[in-house]
Image (cartoon, grey):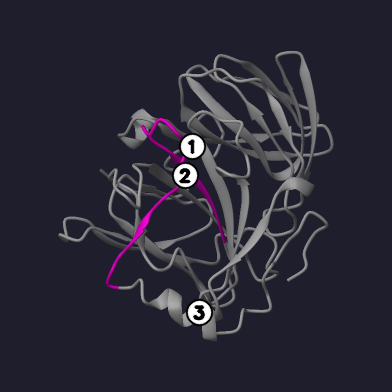
Amino acid sequence: MTLHRPEGTLCHDGDPILLTPETAGWAFAGLRVLRIGAGRSRIVRTGEFEAFVLPLAGACAVRVDGENFALTGRESVFTRVTDFAYVPRDAEVELVAEDGDLEVALPMARCGKRLDPRYGPAEDVPVEIRGAGSATRQVTNFGIPGVWEHADKLNACELITPDGNWSSYPPHKHDEASDCEVVNEEIYYFRIAGRDGVTPSRDGFGMHRTYTADGAVNENVAVRDGDVFLIPHGYHGPCIAAPGYPMYYLNVLAGPAPERSMAFCDDPAHSWVRARWDAEPLDPRCPVTSREGRIG
């Protein structure tokens, strides 16, 4: 399996990403990223999948099952915490770019239950500061258990790592059912800011590591704006933002557990690092964004 999918390798009919479980080689998690020109609309049929409608750039009107949601969106993933919508399986969803060009992500999970559509306001999305020192990062927990319960299998969150910092650290895994973890397939979708720290650009880069204890998987990859990395199993982390280039990634997780969970186990060789954070200051650049806009 090819775990790193560089920008352009998952494009479909002019859209940046069409990643199905079949494309990934697993059973549950998927991701679509659509580009819709100003004043235009697209119809998406969800089939077996529930999804979030998450604006990456621009505003979006969502029409599904007789409901209409106006998503304010944002200029870029580095400027604001956005509102979003949940759309169910077996639905016909119309997405409309009403106020300009729109780029929108649809994190997806194959599921059994059909729930109602629902709006997620930005003011209800908690922003967490995780880690300390050079491992300080922002986690925007819009679609995780305990925050958003209106989903069957789908979990999703966003991370912003200031330039020069590390995230997804210590390395961790969720590939077996145990006392500390559940089985989840995971997608990392990267956006890398350019020199202004706001506008995504292919000029910058970051690093990502995924590996297994037995060495069967050992990937240390340079990632750039628009790249996707698949995590079917094994420890993953760190993600490192190169100096000068802040890093964003969207995490999409889904698996076979009867209850949604994002439980994981650290690599025991590195879990001691967490205790050191108690004595380290937070990076003052975090949080980077809120529902009002940029603050970091």
Q: From mark 2 to mark 1, how far is it between C-alphas? A: 5 Å
At 70% from the left edge and 66% from the top edge, which residue is drawn?
288
The answer to whether the residues at label 2 and label 1 have Cβ atoms under 8 Å apart is yes
- The amino acid on which the numbered mark 1 sits, given as a three-letter code, is Cys
The residue nearer to you, when weighing 283 against 221, is: 283
User: What segment carries the magenta color?
Assistant: 248-269
The answer to whether the residues at label 3 and label 2 have Cβ atoms under 8 Å apart is no
Q: Position of residue 171 (x, y in %)?
A: 36, 64
Is the residue marked by circle 2 packed among few (<14), some (14-19), or many (20+) residues within 10 Å? some
At 51% from the left edge and 38% from the top edge, which residue is drawn?
17
Q: From mark 3 to mark 1, how far is it between C-alphas? A: 40 Å
Q: Which residue is mark 1?
A: 11
Considering only vertical position in the picture, is 176 above or below 64?
Answer: below
Marks 3 and 1, the one that precedes in the sequence: 1
Q: From mark 3 to mark 2, how far is it between C-alphas? A: 38 Å
Count of numbered tags = 3
At 56% from the left edge and 73% from the top edge, which residue is drawn?
136
- Residue 9 in view, yes or no: yes
Q: Which residue is mark 3?
A: 277
Residue 51's disc number: none
Residue 8's disc number: 2
Q: Nearer the viewer, mark 3 or mark 2?
A: 3
Q: Nearer the viewer, mark 3 or mark 1?
A: 3
Q: Position of residue 78 (x, y in %)?
A: 68, 59
Is the residue marked by circle 1 packed among few (<14), some (14-19), or many (20+) residues within 10 Å? some
Q: Position of residue 43 (x, y in %)?
A: 65, 19
* Residue 255 included in the magenta stretch of the image: yes
